[in-house]
Amino acid sequence: MIEAYWQLARRPFANTPDPAFVYRSESFVEGFSRLLYDATELRGGLSLITGEIGCGKTMLAQALADRLAGSACDVVTLQYPKVTPSQMLAGLLRGLGEQRPPRGKLAAIELLAATLSERHGNGRRPVLVVDEAQLASPSLLEEIRLLTNFEDRQDKHLHIVLLGQPELRDRVRRHPQIDQRVSLRFHVEPMEPKDVAGYVDHRLRVAGRSGAPIFTGDAVATLADRSAGVPRRVNTIATQALFVGAMRHRASIDAELITDVADDQE
Ligand SMILES: Nc1ncnc2c1ncn2[C@@H]1O[C@H](COP(=O)(O)OP(=O)(O)OP(=O)(O)O)[C@@H](O)[C@H]1O
Ligand SMILES: [Mg+2]
């Protein structure tokens, strides 16, 4: 309904990590470029991406996977790391094309070492992305650390990207063996107010809006304030505002309407 009212081809503020909607703010570009470099060129071992809830870590990982599709880097993503080390190894092997990973852990590790070495010989550059890594058990984190040991004299055979909420940074710090293997640290910050304006405009254009701005300048400023620049909160408030604005037959969305729906969210 809101799409038709606001002349949009699709939902502009869905809370999904759809790479088509990626807004490349200055800080996103910096994080993305550094992550891309670490995972594809440097392959230093472990990239650690942290950030507050809803700030865009998963979106960053999706953008990376999207960019690497069809390249020499095979990306395997573990979206939910509340699994045992054996389950993670099996998932990684499956992601690398092994239809039937062995049951035993030792056999799985041997197969993984052989697979990674063979891939490396063929110029492939596998990347394991572990999202929500703050949920990983100590034994899973230890297993992930051991995966960075697959290497030859020149290169790592597997690059790992850990994404998680800020407590992941503290956990890693408490484990020198993991901490020392971190080749990139990047913290995803909330957006600056000027980026919220660019973000709103960008998402509306990707969703097919071509006419006059829907949100007034004051509305965007209020949206930046009430969301604290957190993209997921921007999406939620903006979606509600579009809905209420359509119900009230508004021609645009002003600051007062943003305040109304943001109050309802609290
Ligand atoms: N750079 C961006 N461009 C466009 N949309 C974004 C961007 N960053 C985040 N978003 C939007 O915000 C939503 C929330 O971001 P995301 O899921 O990546 O946060 P997160 O940091 O992974 O949160 P959590 O800690 O809860 O896992 C995404 O689904 C996406 O719609
Ligand atoms: Mg996430």
Image (cartoon, grey):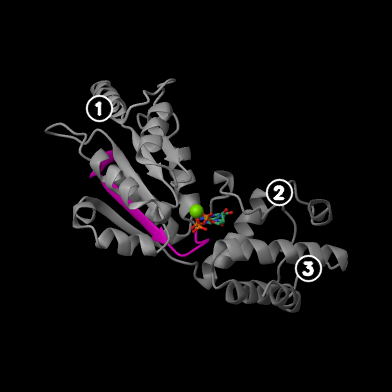
- Residue that label 2 marks: 208
Q: Which quarter of the rendering shows the C terminus?
A: bottom right
Left or right relative to 154: residue 219: right
Is 9 magenta? The answer is no
Q: CA distance from mark 1 to mark 2?
A: 47 Å
Crowd tier of the residue under label 1, counting other residues whose Cα lies within 10 Å: few below 14, some 14–19, many 20 or above = some
The quadrant holding residue 155 is top left
Distance from mark 1 CB to nearest ligand 2 atom below 8 Å: no
The kind of secondary structure element at disc 3 is loop
- Residue that label 3 marks: 252
Name which residue type carries label 1.
Ala
Name which residue type carries label 3.
Ser
Q: Position of residue 8 (x, y in %)?
A: 75, 50
The quadrant holding residue 172 is bottom left
Left or right relative to 181: residue 108: right
- Region rendered in magenta: 40-55
- Residue that label 1 marks: 113
The kind of secondary structure element at disc 1 is helix
Numbered disc in front, either 1 or 2: 1
Q: Position of residue 161 (x, y in %)?
A: 35, 46
Looking at marks 2 and 3 on the same chain, the residue that comes earlier in the sequence is marked by 2
Residue extending farthest to the front is 104
The quadrant holding residue 215 is bottom right
Numbered disc in front, either 3 or 1: 1
Residue extending farthest to the left is 153
Say if 52 sits above or below 226 in the image.
above
Which residue is depicted at the point 42% across and 20% down? 100
